[in-house]
Image (cartoon, rainbow, N blue to C red):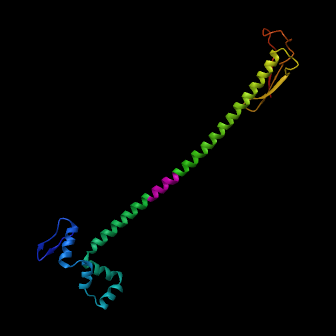
Amino acid sequence: GLRFILGGEDLTQQTPSGTQNLLSEYFGANLPLLLVRTVFHGQHAVDDLLSATDQRIKEHLSLLVPSSMWQACALEASNRRRHLNLKHRDALAQIELRQRDVALLTDQWHAAEARAQALREEVERRRAAAAELQSVALQYASGDPEEAQESVDLMDEGGRAITVSGLSSSVPPGSGPSRSPLVSVKLQ
């Protein structure tokens, strides 16, 4: 934290802003500007630092902060970067995996939709076939052999042709329900 000791007396306040205000009272309103005005660098000293090698800059900085602290900070930063890189790679792998899952599930959904549509169409075909059979049966039951069809061609769910024959003229008109016609079913 910020501490202010003047003449051996600790003048540090309870809050950093309080200590900063006290510093401003003692040294003026703008402490950074005051420090710039009180420290003089000759032109050669400034050039010396700007043109220094990395090794020379590190030597100068080690006078302010020990080099072991710089090395510890560099090691910590490297460890954090490595850890974050691993987390980043794991996140990218998870994203890729989830994208593949989405693609697979989308394909499965489309296939299920196609199967459902095929089943709806099959139900419609069967309803139409049942309605046709019902119509033929009603014509036969009405005793009108000229209107009754001799045979009906249908398709089963496997796409095979079915012929139902013997629906008319095998029973005389008006003979009633006690006598049933001979019906044959042929799968093709």
- The answer to which image quadrant residue 38 occupies is bottom left
- The answer to which image quadrant residue 120 occupies is top right
Does 74 lie within the magenta span? no
Q: Which residues are magenta?
A: 88-97
User: Is residue 131 or residue 171 the one in the foreground?
Assistant: 131
Q: Against 62, is 12 above or below?
A: above
> What is the x, y in percent for residue 48?
32, 88
> What is the x, y in percent for residue 165?
83, 21
Does 96 lie within the magenta span? yes
> What is the x, y in percent for residue 71?
31, 71
Q: Against 158, is 36 above or below?
A: below
User: Is residue 102 or residue 21 the one in the foreground?
Assistant: 21
Q: Residue at the location (52% across, 54% down)?
A: 96
Q: Residue at the location (24% across, 78% down)?
A: 31
Q: Residue at the location (85% across, 18% down)?
A: 168
Quarter in which the C terminus is drawn: top right
Q: Residue at the location (58% across, 49% down)?
A: 103
Q: How many marks?
A: 0
Give the residue furthest to the right.
146
> What is the x, y in percent for residue 185?
79, 22
- The answer to which image quadrant residue 41 occupies is bottom left
Image position of 51 (left or right of 171) = left
Helix, strand or loop for the magenta stretch, by majority: helix
Give the residue furthest to the left.
8
User: Is residue 118 or residue 53 the one in the foreground?
Assistant: 118
Image position of 97 (left or right of 180) = left
